[in-house]
Amino acid sequence: MLRVRHITRYRYARPVRFGEHRLMLRPREDPDQTLVFERLRITPEPGRIELQRDGHGNFLGIAEFDSSWDELCFDSEILVARGAEALPPIPPLPGLWPFPLGATAEERDPAAWARRFMALSHGEVLPALAAMNAQVRRDFTYRRRLERGVQTPDETLSLRSGACRDFAVLLVTAARSLGLRARFVSGYVHCPEPAGGPRRLGGGHTHAWTQVLTPEAGWVDFDPTSGRVGAEGLIRVAVADDPADALPIQGVYLGAAADFLHMHVEVSVESEAPASNSAVPFEPSQLWGVA
């Protein structure tokens, strides 16, 4: 099981009023992941909060406030049980390395980039996607970008660097260019201390990756930041066609621009052994008002 603590704190120079905030903090109900426990504390306490479902089946919290404060804090804790996942063997593509990147305009085009992998895989979708995923991990530089927004896929191909969300959008775009259904995923990643191997990138904050509907195995998770295929160590919170629809927290405050001081985010993801009693009681947050 994986336990996640996610704290987001906003500070202001003086008390301000808060508008509606939209929260994507509760994990999805997927066959391979089960929410065992959740707790959500919001300071100041909202005047109203409710839980809804969006068109993708994601949980969407709506919080409304009726008080002024110089700080706004969302403190979320979840415990998620991971289910078993069966993926077919994925053969590596022969002759993949070296594989040129960004040398010509065509090589900066995600569709042309994707077609080269499909040609090497002789039309086999899963090996082609796995090879794309692996190349991002091998040849691109991970950069934690604190600024808003996502790079365009051609920018990511040209720069050969980006944040996890940039890599995820590149892979979504490449898969869609092949006529496949693909979507952006946001959530968390478990990054245990390595035993002689490289630490998995993307931990210490929220994470983003890609899901593609493959003919061989249905929906499959591809994490181009780590190069891994499959959902091991990942917790899905939201899936979306556009990254802007999968943000953990969105909201506004009523005041001057200078009132905002800073935002601080802390995320920890730790592994826990399952309880001796397999029927772990589920303790939903009372703030959601749902069981």
Image: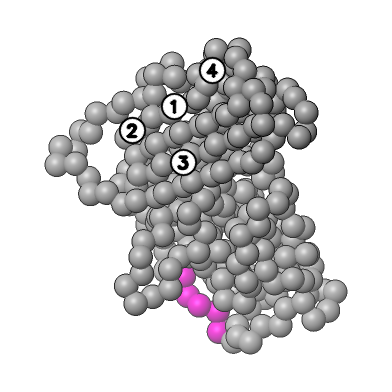
**In the image, what residue type sits under mark 4?**
Pro
As measured in the structure, the alpha-carbon distance from the residue carrying label 4 to the one carrying label 1 is 10 Å
Q: Mark 4 points at which residue?
A: 46
Seen in the picture, residue 127 relative to 209 is either above or below; the reply is below
Q: What span is colored magenta in the figure?
A: 90-94
Viewer-closest of 5 and 82? 5
Q: Which of marks 4 and 1 is nearer the N terminus?
A: 1
- In space, the residues marked 4 and 2 are separated at their CA atoms by 21 Å
Residue on which the image places disc 1: 41
Q: Position of residue 182 (x, y in %)?
A: 63, 51
- Given residues 47 and 96, the one toward you in this image is 47
The residue that label 3 is drawn on is 6
Residue 50 in the image, given as x and y percentages of width and height: 52, 18
- Which disc is residue 73 wearing? none
Evaluate whether residue 28 shows in this view.
no
Measured as percent of width and height from the top left, residue 287 is found at: 44, 19
Q: Give percent across and percent down for residue 207.
A: 54, 52
Neighbour class for label 1 at 10 Å: few (<14), some, many (≥20)?
some
Residue under circle 2?
Answer: 37
- Inspect the image, locate mark 3, and give the three-letter code of the amino acid beneath it: His
Decide: few, some or many residues near mark 3? Use Cα within 10 Å; few <14, some 14-19, many ≥20. many
Where residue 127 sits, quadrant-wise, is bottom right
Residue 101 occupies quadrant? bottom right
SS at circle 1: strand
Where 48 sits versus 22, above or below?
A: above
Horizontal arrangement in the rendering, residue 245 relative to residue 224 (left or right): right
Q: Quadrant of the C terminus?
A: top left
